[in-house]
Image: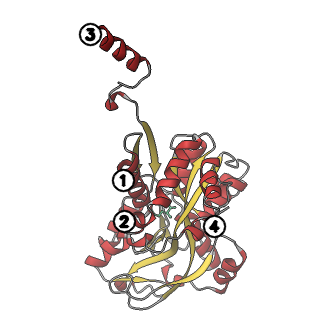
Amino acid sequence: MQWRKTLIAAAVTLGLLVPAHAMAKTDVLFGGASIVGVYYQVALQISNLMNKQMGDQYNYIGRPTGGSVFNINAMSQKSFEFGVAQSDRNYQAYEGLEDWKGKPVKNLRSVFSMHPETVLLVTRKDTGIKKVEDIKGKRINIGNPGSGQRFNAEEVLRIYGIDQNKDIRAESLQQHEASRALVDRKIDAFFYTVGNPSAAIEEPAQSVDIAIVPLDHPDIRKLAEEKPYYVFTTIPAGTYKGVDYDVPTYAVTATVITHEEVPNDVVYDMVKTVFDNLDDLKSSHAAFRNLDPKSMLEGLSAPFHPGAAKYYKEKGWQ
Ligand code: GLU
């Protein structure tokens, strides 16, 4: 039996007999946002896809987080491999503007765009808030500091001439707390920038009569024309229970981001798996229904990660 021993020894040396479970899998952390939003679904659904298709190599973990700002900062700290962030916040971070004034996040890299996200002002019908000006004197959630929506809320308030320190009682709740607080009458309205439909609005709409306030100030339309990361749009009637009218507002795009030091093959494998199984991803959440490769390569501010660029070149998309 000497030959068998030799064979086994050779196989072990060549790494052929290492049992699958003994081979270390690469852990990949993917940051979403509040559990009632759509970012968390992006993180979870892509993680599910990766664990299903490449679970022998990767262990993807989708995490709830504070939102866009948190995720961008997690990239600059290299604490997550992937995250989701609004296109406007992405631009500001890479260029060193607003929250990142004087400290641009130059290691930020783009992977692809996902769904559009509308800027929403959601209230209960019984508050009597029909237009933005009506929020004066009311308790309004403008978003937690780690969120993307907080900047949009502040921008809308500025455009409508509302002082967040004097004219309203501004709250900084995370979205799952805000959705609950609206139902419990602890707040009168919340701002949220999110893909539709979102559980953050569907859930309150099941227990109270909600309304969505139009954001159609001429300066918002102007902003949407000027800024590459904004578009003016409408939320179609019937998207949410009780909201049977079109709501004009503006929108950004949810983008998947990474950082410079994530290995090329980690990003390449994720991008290839997503595009090779795009129909699976599209059917995993209603907000992903209209994803298509062309628009998924648009609306990004930071340079593509080389692992993503490699796949796009192979496909002739770049
Ligand atoms: N746009 C929000 C943010 O940047 C998150 C929306 C969501 O979770 O879907 O924080």
Q: Hey, which quadrant is residue 6 in on the image?
A: top left
On the rendered image, what quadrant is the C terminus found in? bottom right
In this picture, residue 247 sits left or right of residue 105: left
Q: Are marks 1 and 2 in contact (CB under 8 Å)?
A: yes
Q: Which residue is mark 3?
A: 1
Identity of the residue drawn at 35% across and 24% down: 17
Q: Are marks 4 and 2 in contact (CB under 8 Å)?
A: no
Tell which tag, 1 or 3, sits nearer the viewer: 3
Identity of the residue drawn at 30% across and 14% down: 4
Above/below status of 143 relative to 250: above
Q: Within 10 angstroms of label 1, few (less than 14), some, or many (20 or more) residues?
A: some
**Alpha carbon separation for disc pair 2 and 3:** 54 Å
Q: Is residue 67 visible?
A: yes
Q: Which residue is mark 1?
A: 48
Circle 2 SS class: loop
**Alpha carbon separation for disc pair 1 and 3:** 46 Å
Q: Which residue is mark 2?
A: 284
Q: Which amino acid, by three-letter code, is at mark 4?
A: Glu
The x, y position of residue 71, in whole percent, is: 53, 51
